[in-house]
């Protein structure tokens, strides 16, 4: 039988010890400000993209209100982007596009950062994710915003 007095590893500690984090920095004050605009019914912005500044900090990459075409123009396959959008039904979705030309380490790091990035965007109910721009575009086409 395992000694229950030893700390268990991973993000989900049950021994009361400090839980590990992904190390993603989402402290940029522009992130909640831009997200508040997307969430506001009176605002033209309907989507927000967050990009990396360095290896572990997110910043606002772009925002817009022009729908899927405009959002897809802001994405290229050389980077990993997170974000969120407001649907026509008033629901909020998280976004993640892992560019196929982004490095393997960047894509892996982004996978570890996904939950922290999504948690920075309050009130979301679902997600749209793609492993490249084409896959992301296909999944985004099923969303009305």
Image: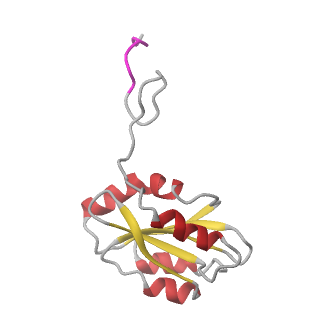
Could you tell whether 86 is left or right of 31 in the image? right
Reply yes or no: does residue 87 show up in magenta. no
Magenta span: predominant SS is: loop
Residue 54 position in % (x across, y down): 26, 63
Q: Quadrant of residue 55?
A: bottom left
Give the camera-side residue of 142 and 27.
Answer: 27
**Residue at 53%, 80% in the rendered image:** 138
Could you tell whether 52 is left or right of 96 in the image? left
Residue 131 position in % (x across, y down): 41, 69
Q: Quadrant of residue 10?
A: top left
Residue 72 position in % (x across, y down): 47, 84
Which residues are the magenta region?
2-8
Residue occupying the far right of the picture: 89
Quarter of the rendering occupied by the C terminus: bottom right
Q: How is the image coloured?
A: secondary structure
**Residue at 34%, 59% in the rendered image:** 57
Quarter of the rendering occupied by the N terminus: top left
Count of numbered circles in the view: 0
**Residue at 51%, 58% in the rendered image:** 118
**Residue at 58%, 84% in the rendered image:** 65
Reply yes or no: does residue 3 show up in magenta. yes
Residue 17 position in % (x across, y down): 42, 24
Give the camera-side residue of 59 and 5.
Answer: 59
Could you tell whether 142 is left or right of 118 in the image? right
């Amino acid at each position: 039988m395992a000694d229950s007095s030893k700390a268990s590893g991973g993000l989900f500690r049950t021994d009361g010890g400090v839980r590990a984090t992904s190390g993603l920095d989402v402290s940029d004050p522009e992130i909640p400000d831009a997200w508040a605009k997307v969430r506001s019914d009176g605002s033209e912005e309907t989507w927000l993209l967050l990009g990396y500044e360095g290896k572990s900090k997110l910043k606002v990459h772009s925002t817009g209100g022009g729908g899927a075409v405009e959002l897809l123009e802001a994405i290229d396959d050389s980077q990993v982007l997170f974000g969120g959008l407001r649907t026509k039904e008033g629901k909020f979705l998280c976004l993640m596009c892992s560019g196929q030309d982004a490095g393997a380490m960047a894509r892996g790091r982004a996978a570890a950062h996904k939950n922290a990035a999504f948690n920075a965007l309050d009130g979301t109910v679902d997600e749209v994710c793609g492993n490249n721009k084409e896959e992301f575009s296909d999944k985004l086409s099923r969303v009305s915003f």
